[in-house]
Amino acid sequence: MKRITLLFFLLSNVLLAQVPEGKQVISSLYIYDLQSGESTLILKEERHFEAPNWSPDGRFLLINSAGKLEKIGLDGKNLGTLITGEIQKANNDHGYAFDGKTLFISSGKPDVRGGSYIYKVEAEGGIPELITELSPSYWHGVSPDGKDVVYCAQRNNNFDVYKISTNGGEEIRLTSESGLDDGPEYSPDGKFIYFNSYRSGMMQIWRMKPDGSDPEQMTFDNHSNWFAHISPNNKVATIITYIEDQKESHPFGRQVKLRLLDLETKAVTDLTEEFYGGQGTINVPSWNPEGTKFAYVRYALKDI
């Protein structure tokens, strides 16, 4: 959500800056079944929502819309807004701890114009606790033991991967290459942090050890590849692929497809056909607990 949308997030928490004038967003929430290879539409509404997480108990999906978090049943029924206290500017970087007890949310502060900070709150909602003092900070992953979160942050005019204790404190910089490093996510076994990086001159998926050492490239094609979400079986990851090179940007409203990355062989296979999506489609982990399905969002535009 970085470079192209940073100015936008300083102004609001919806993608109006990227929606053509005179158009309204239509959002469609899908569940993809890995066994059947089919996507099932469960919710379609004339509003903008983003970034589904699958709840740890497998019963619902969590999306963000207009700065708040909503629970959506697997049948598409709206189950209400999650109570998160002062967090009313949530963006599309949020997700659960591996044990399912804690939810991490990136959000602006109620009394600060713009910015993004990382908070934690009990999974069922409650009073949020601030983790990061510096902004912008965009959550993307948590360690399997629940001790650290990893995130993308802009410091000194460059976006890099950082980690910090889930109790706050001093942040640790894990990447230092020029260009954007984004989307860090721990593997379920804790051995790697997967992320996307522009260090090769094309946005590709990489991984490194939890201390930032031994970076290894995982994808090598001529597409812009973002956001590796690791399956609970630790064998494959979903990625979102822009058909046309987007440089260091992850914009809304482009032709994309979802693909499956084999974490051992590095083979990549298509899961979906091309569709209209991008920012908001699958920013965050969205696998079901069994690792057999995942959720994502497609978009369309209509005249106002």
Image (spheres, rainbow, N blue to C red):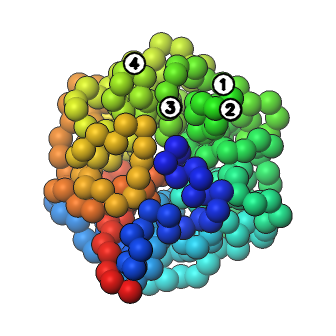
- State which quarter of the image contains the C terminus: bottom left
- Image: 240 above or below 124: above
Query: CB atoms at circles 2 and 4 under 8 Å apart?
Result: no
Label 3: element kind: strand
Between the C-alphas of marks 3 and 1, the distance is 11 Å
Per the image, the residue denoted by label 1 is 173
The picture places residue 173, in percent across and down from the top left corner, at 66, 25
Mark before the other along the chain sequence, 3 or 2: 2
Sequence-first disc among 4 and 3: 3
Label 2, on which residue? 155
x, y percentage for residue 124?
66, 68
Image: 117 above or below 33:
above
Q: Amino acid at mark 1?
A: Arg
Task: State the separation of the CA atoms marked 2 and 4.
Answer: 24 Å
Q: Amino acid at mark 4?
A: Glu
Label 1 near label 2: C-beta < 8 Å?
A: yes
Dot 2: few (<14), some (14–19), or many (≥20) neighbours within 10 Å?
few
Q: Are marks 3 and 2 in contact (CB under 8 Å)?
A: no
From the top left corner, tell me how far across and down residue 61 is, in percent. 47, 68
- Gap between marks 2 and 1 measured at Cα: 10 Å
Q: CA distance from mark 4 to mark 1?
A: 17 Å
Outermost residue on the top side: it is 214
First of labels 4, 1 by sequence position: 1
Q: Nearer the viewer, mark 2 or mark 4?
A: 2
In the image, taking residue 192 as reference, residue 175 lies left or right, namely right
Give the residue at mark 3.
181
Question: Label 4 belongs to which residue?
Answer: 216
Q: Amino acid at mark 2?
A: Arg
